[in-house]
Amino acid sequence: MVDSSDDGPSLRAASFGPGVRDVVRLLSPRQRSQIADIATVMQLPSGSLVYREGTNANSIFIVADGVLKTFRDLPSGKRRVLAFLFRDDAFGLAQSGHYVYSVQTIRPATLYRIRVPALMDILKHDADLTFHFLCKVTHELRGALRHNLIMARRDAVGRLAMFLLMLEQNARAHSDSRIEIPMSRSDVANYLGLTHESVSRALSRLERNSIIAFAGRHELRVLDRARFEKLATTL
Amino acid sequence: MVDSSDDGPSLRAASFGPGVRDVVRLLSPRQRSQIADIATVMQLPSGSLVYREGTNANSIFIVADGVLKTFRDLPSGKRRVLAFLFRDDAFGLAQSGHYVYSVQTIRPATLYRIRVPALMDILKHDADLTFHFLCKVTHELRGALRHNLIMARRDAVGRLAMFLLMLEQNARAHSDSRIEIPMSRSDVANYLGLTHESVSRALSRLERNSIIAFAGRHELRVLDRARFEKLATTL
DNA sequence: CGGACTATTGAGACTCCTCAACTAACGTGG
DNA sequence: CCACGTTAGTTGAGGAGTCTCAATAGTCCG
């Protein structure tokens, strides 16, 4: 399924990893069954806490389906959302044996849970599989860098535009300028470093200016793509 | 040099990677010579551009010594610093064959340059080495997440305090409450998402309040560690 | 249908950015 | 060795934008 000539170009093209939504898919049948042997499938309803920051890190996870968020609760009581997770994303980052962020489902989710010791046994002897995980982490890293770029902006509308663009690129399902926002305004706000009031105001402004139009609170259409993308890229 | 019993616990402790300033050091002699075979040593004076964002990504680099910054230039003319690089850090992240950020030396630096095709040949057959790179990228990811947390704060002094604390932890050389700031105020500002004026004002305020004391523009001492750490952690 | 949560909208305070002037430090060339 | 110009850094006054506090409307679920 994955021969080396297939790996070569695409991997070299993006040290490391091209699209990278594919740790599971790009595996050879043998590798896939290896993973299946040590993975547990979990079905979680919306709002479930997968694990809490600081607890012992004994597993890593891969999203088979659904939407999740990673976050940290700050001493002040504020909550900071670090990332949103979609199909094929991996999570479970730890330091000194403890998870570095909490993870919660936003929509009902199906997860593969892989125990770290078992995974390590396989990784030690399988360069290909290890490389796939390398690509996964690289993908996560790019996401964090994009997040940083978003936070660089001072204006709420600009951040929001970038965020919406990101959502659109994530969900390539229906690319007809409809964007689904699966998370709450507060989650968006905590991700963008704004208050939920500012998010609300910024969205209102976009709608007032006929750049977007809402179809329910969690779905919108882009009316004026030129201005929309200009807002997102003009930083 | 690195036997499996050594790898096991430490790796499980931090999926993936413990301290991780050690891709080169933790390698077996065989691996090290493999790397040496394909690596080029570069000596660069202060202020050198290693590569520019968008150019063809044909190498990855490891910092043997010195200080560097990664950054992106935005259409508006503003510059956003994404990270500072110190000894043993790796860099060279690319997407679709192009580097995603520019890299420049802040202090004279020595780099190992490794061509991607050659590296891939080795990684394909060496799970251990691939795993080491996995740890490296994970380390970079943690840095990006910490950056995000810093940006979550709204107040300039708080960001600065967190940044200084980060610098102190990076340079474990002299841990007697002296912190060296190798980069310019503008670089700090671009990293923290502030203007250089705000950085200057915040530093002045810290000094006026007797929390820190400068010994030249690029070195300071922490006078009141309690208040200092309270500022950094009270978010 | 009721209650709790989510979302929207408004008025005032606060902080940082912008613009500007000024000082200090550094490197260059005479 | 000194003078000068350029860059880095500090400090000040005013304005723009978001946060805070508060009230209201809409939505989901039992």
Image (cartoon, coloured by chain):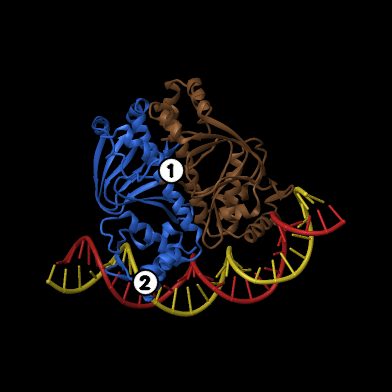
Chain colours: A brown, B blue, C red, D yellow
Residue A11 appears in the figure? no
Please name the residue that numbered disc 2 is placed on. B211
Mark in the foreground, 1 or 2: 2
Q: Look at label 2 and name its amino acid.
A: Ile
Against D29, residue A155 (above or below) is below
Does dot 1 land on a helix, a strand or a loop? loop
Lower sequence index among marks 1 and 2: 1
Against B217, residue B169 (above or below) is above
Residue A36 appears in the figure? yes
Chain at tag 1:
B
Residue B10 quadrant: top left
What residue do we see at 34% from left, 56% from top?
B169
Does dot 2 land on a helix, a strand or a loop? loop
Q: Is residue B57 left or right of residue A21?
A: left
What residue do we see at 51% from left, 34% from top?
A114
Along the line of sight, the residue nearer the viewer: A174 or D22: D22
Number of other residues with Cα within 10 Å of mark 1, as a class: few under 14, some 14 to 19, many 20 or more: many
Along the line of sight, the residue nearer the viewer: D12 or B142: B142
Q: Position of residue B86 (x, y in %)?
A: 31, 50
Against B148, residue D19 (above or below) is below
Q: Is residue B220 left or right of residue C3?
A: left
Number of other residues with Cα within 10 Å of mark 2, as a class: few under 14, some 14 to 19, many 20 or more: some
Query: CA separation, marks 1 and 2?
Result: 38 Å
Q: Is residue A215 left or right of residue A230?
A: right
On whether disc 1 and disc 2 are found on a single subunit, the reply is yes
Q: Look at label 1 and name its amino acid.
A: Val
Q: Position of residue A89 (x, y in %)?
A: 54, 38
Against B181, residue B73 (above or below) is above
What residue do we see at 48% from left, 50% from top?
A54
Q: Position of residue A113 (x, y in %)?
A: 54, 35
Q: Position of residue A214 (x, y in %)?
A: 72, 49
Please name the residue that numbered disc 1 is placed on. B100
